[in-house]
Image (cartoon, coloured by chain):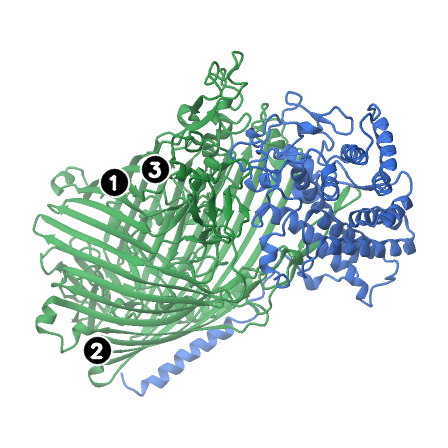
Chain colours: A blue, B green
Amino acid sequence: MTYTNIPRKAARVLATAALTSVAACSGFLEVESPNVIDAAAVNPITDAVTLANSAQQSFQSALGWSIMYGAWFTGEAIVAETFPTRNEFGRRDVTTANGSHNGEVWFPLSQSMAGNHLVAELALNPALPTPDTNINLVRAHTWLGYGFVRMAESFCEGTVYGGPLLNTNAMLDSAIANFTVAITKATANGTATATTLGNVSRVGRARANLQRGNTAAAIADATAVPAGFSFSFNHLDDPGNRTRLSNRMWQFTFDRGSISVPASYQVSDPRVTYLLPGQHSLAAQDPNSGPFVVQQKYPAFTSPIRVASKLEADYIAAEAQGTAAQLSLVGTRRTAAGRPAYAGATDAASVLSEFMRQKHLDFYLEGQRLGDFRRNTAAVTGVPVAGAAYFKPGFAPIGNQTCYPLPLAETDNNDNIP
Amino acid sequence: MFRRLAQACVGVVLLATAGVTALGAQVATGVITGKVTDRGTGRPLAEARVIVVGTAIAVFSNAQGEYRITQAPAGPANVTIYKIGYQSSTDTVRVTAGQTSTVNFALNVSRVQLSDVVVTGTAGNQERRAQAAVVTSVDVSDIAKSSPAQSFSQLLQSRVPSVSVNSASGTAGTSRRINIRGAASVNLSNQPLIFIDGIRVNEGQPGLGAGGQSADRLNNINPDDIESIEVVKGPAAATLYGADASAGVIQIITKSGRAGAQRFNQSITLEAGTSDQNWTPPTNYAFCSAASILPTSTNPLCRGQTTTTLVSDNPLVRSGAFRTGSVGNLSYSANGGGQGYGYFFSVNNDLQNGTLPNNSFGRKGIRTNFNFVPSSKVTVNASLGVQQSSLNAPQNDNNIYGFLGGGLLGTPLTRTDDNTGANGWFGANRQLSAIEAIETGLFSRGTTAGVTVSFVPNSWLTHKLVVGGDLLFDEATVFFPKNPINSYAGLLNTGSNTQSRTSSERYTVDYQANARNQFGADNQFELNTTLGLQMIQTRSEFVSATGTGFVVNSNNVISAASQTSATGQLTEVRQRGWIAQSQLGQLNRRFLTVGVRVDEFSVFGSQVDPAILPKIGGSWVISEEGFWGGFLASSVSSLRARAAYGTTGRAPGAGAALTTLAAAPSIAGTTNEAGAVPANPGNADLKPERGTEVEVGFDIGLFNERVGLELTYFDKTTNDLILSRPLPPSLGFTQNPQVNIGGVRNAGFEVTVNASVFESQNVALDLRGGFATLKNELTDLGGINAFGTLNRFTEGAQLGSWVSKRIRNIDETTGIVTVADTFEVAGNLFPTFEGTMTATLTLFRQLRINAQFDTKQDFSVYNLTDFFRETQLVRSNARLDTTVLARRERLQRFGNPTPGQPAFRQENGASTTVNEVRDHYLQPGDFVRFRELGVNWDVPTRFVSLLPGAQTASIGLAVQNVALWTHKDFTGADPEVISAAGAQFSRDDFLTQPNPRTTVLRFNLTF
């Protein structure tokens, strides 16, 4: 071997490598990714209907979670569940690190807000046709309004889109603003769908105004809702998309045995139907939960959930109008339910308490109680009592929360929250 | 899809083919024979590797130490002998065409392995002396004689310092976690890449739908097929494996035929054994309820008692849930060779039955390796392995349908006279038979095939091409039978069958051209240059369907169900890496190596350039220098210093760089329609994590090679750490984007000791051991906040450190327990010290007794089982019987019992719960385990010869998990178990089966 051989050898090795290089090129690194939707492949204008319906569905799914957790928090249902994180709701002692709280209450609501916000922002896109009457914008603002209402009623403080903290009034003001846009565009649109969404927004705005303390505005909106109006979310029995498309209350009654009707609602009222042990074959997930009483308001995965109605508007108007109107509606509702006339005290507090009671029977598991509890704390009965022992052994006593804290996942990662 | 890879590789194949066909001219050849012996004892040495330098020829010595090379080119030839545990030896012989030349070798024992040839992490075969970074070899054929190991991972357990193998549960056939030199990544896998004979295989641990346990692809490998294992620990050695190798590389080298051996050997091994759970599950307690004490009560425990009566029940023991498991393995192999060829063939049929009902793991396989030496310039090695495994897994872990869940969370209050209902188990009608009726299985078939062609056109140039693929097909089943008593939940009671199919294809093309040049005075310098290309393509497809609602359980195909749903995924990843390395050696004792790999990946962001991964290292065999002598040489017989620097990476997952939406249907009237929600904001700049490692060390032989020491310090830093930047949920994305921020450091010492304590004609005592330390630290989070609620990622702490709002003060008078305001680090997830020691006593050269101990220290385990039984579903007498624990201990565990008072009070006055104050349940996991005890007797020849044709026979008895010593504050059953085996940063024990004691009797016969 000599030094003179080295360049020739090196040349041969390099030539080999060069040939190999050429052979190994030609698009080898191009792959397909069918698992995901490349955002660039979606046209926000032509696909606006899909995006708007998806965002509406996100709110529908969030609403299901919100109703269930709110029911546990306010004593509308008991937690027949082993998850410590869910029992925190039953104990009104929700911690910021609670994974269920973040994953099943806060995130679904946030996702629906962000999705509807994305659609609402299409109004800024000059390519969007008829922005003043666009049904997708009507839909997005309607559910944005409801998203803010749910946030304001449930959370002590809120935030949207990674923004700063919002207090309750700010959230309610945002709800009112979005409902106003929805009503305006719905009126201009004039189609049946738009009209329905407009009335949903009127009920929603009345609810937000009531919570905000704007009684006159609440009454005005409530009375503008046409008689007999009712809007419900339909559900599907789709085993592949149970969490997104099915009735949450039945899912967590039937599949998991998590929701049990508390004694305070076992009052033989036709508005709250249930089955006692022996009348059904289901089991509570946690045998420590006592008798498993199965709610029958939503007896199937397909059971619809009422979102807005003239009945709710009537309750809003009556509450805003005062004791006499409340007493009148109490009478109407008891009669309608086949119950004897109200014979209790007629002072304002007593009437309001009975008024709330009737409302909560009428709207059992519809997500009304938490907002009512925050607005009329003393008048709402059956809420777990602070300091009392939890009904399951081994747990700490009931806490004194009246609303949920923002999860750690939000406060840790939102740069706009100090 | 494979077409593209095939097209791209055509050139590579053509190159090699051209080389092979260029053999044309035949050269005159002769025969070299000889014998290899131990210089000290004169014993013949079998399985010594004999090569003719500068050719492709390699043969092995037989049981008599004899070798025969039939195609040696005429002329002077350098013959080199390699044998593990001995110094290599080279001699020159003149080969005359058509004649036989003889050269014998007497090898010196060496405890310091400088002469071994390693094939992993190097460009071209290399002696260990030239390697700047450690590549550890495990001689499996030696271990297998006295180890009860039933899987590849068990073979690796406690054999190599810094290779941490953790058995996630005692369930037969489930996974083990392997971490090499700590965990370097938060979001990406910390499991090493696995190659079999140069072909990258589908590693991974698929979930089973049976709770927290996973299956393990590595379990499909028949340990009897493995010749050796090479472990590349970190970036310093793994650079040539590219941008996905920062967690290390494990190469499995299977047994092969013996070209030129002129022999045919067969081996049959029978194993039979048992496994014993060796654990009594804790008992459940409850105070009798008012209803249960009535005369009409059907509860036999409480009837007639008072409500202050504490009753107990242990449904797992009462029902005899645990059984004696079994092991039954049968393997047959044949190997041999003739002139210019060698072959190995094996077939195995193994079955383990676990200690719980429904648990079994069966494995069948065929492997054939064929090597062909058409001339002194070409060798062709072809291998084909076909494996089939069937795992039946019991429901367990974080699982209300599980055996341990049912047994440890049930209450005595549900006991009934007629044994109906819950009867002490958890769940309404979910007794042992109902849990047992759930079928969970994974049937897996895999094929690994590869061809390696080495072409040595002349003495200085070698081409090596490896082409192969690993094909995998899984069938998973989770079946809840229809039942009339509602044992399960919801529609599961109508019968539910989930069938999942996974197919995965992984192809490897690896080409290297290696040129050697000797120059300088007396050819004292050697320049060893390698150029190469490696391409790996992986395509995985997953389809799953669930059917719910059957008429009868026997007709449970999906199409027979009243409701069906399905899901599917497809991912594809391609990697291409260019390799260049040059090594300059002087006098075969001073080496300097520089190299680089340039990697491209389909998963990199669109804006990312190829990853350039350099390496540099040096090795110096000091003891072979002229100045080494006298007293120094007599006490330190060999000494090598080495230092290396290298970089590798870890590539993100498929599609991680894209901005995506997720399919999410919506309801239109009474049907669903397609929809989408924001999924991932994406990151066009996403690139691989970059692992950089500095490794320095010494290999030392002491006292005339009676003691071998290997000392290594490593310092590995991962930069461009891929983290899922946690977005505030209010942004509405379902996924957090992956970003390259932050860093992780892993550093530690590794010490290996290999000593011959005593050796005489009839008695020998060897000690082999080692330890490794680990400092794992998240050095930089790139500005994002600490995240994680139980296993938290905090700058300055270990990855995934346990956290708790730690107890500051316990006031036994008032009951007030004061805790920290925020989560604080409360324990390590990864042991900072792991050690092992194996003692081997050999008597009369026939009886070998092997004992292995290992330890892991300074880490914590979350005893979630106790947490649940004491604070959530209260079943433990430690909570219910107030006399069991002292008041202070009760306050620490459960908080303030005073009504109206918070359980725990933060220093800032806020209240918190036991869910955030876990001090007691984060328990020290430190343990010492008597891991293995093995006795092997090589039956004397005079007895073996009684069997016609028999050559050797051995009988062995081995016990695994002989004894366990844990920290006094650890209250669980086994600190090694991990309930969520698939989670990288978890070490919970939640209703997980501890590792059983396994005893195996082995009989081996060669003939």
Label 3, label 1: how far apart the Cα atoms are: 14 Å
Q: Chain of mark 2?
A: B
Going by the numbered disc 2, the residue's amino acid type is Leu
Going by the numbered disc 1, the residue's amino acid type is Ala
Query: Residue A259 at x, y = what percent?
Result: 64, 34
User: Mark 3 — residue?
Assistant: B996
Q: Chain of mark 3?
A: B
Helix, strand or loop under label 3: loop
Q: Looking at the image, which is closer to me, A132 or A49?
A: A132
User: Mark 2 — residue?
Assistant: B587
Q: Looking at the image, which is closer to me, B257 or B650?
A: B650
The mark that comes first in sequence, 3 or 2, is 2
Going by the numbered disc 3, the residue's amino acid type is Pro
Q: Can residue A223 be seen here?
A: yes
Judged left or right of residue B279, residue A273 is right
Judged left or right of residue A24, residue B514 is left
Q: Quadrant of residue A236?
A: top right
Image mark for residue B239? none
Q: Are marks 3 and 1 in contact (CB under 8 Å)?
A: no
User: Mark 1 — residue?
Assistant: B958
Label 1, label 2: how far apart the Cα atoms are: 46 Å
Crowding at dot 1, Cα within 10 Å, few <14 / some 14-19 / many 20+, comes out as many
Q: Chain of mark 1?
A: B
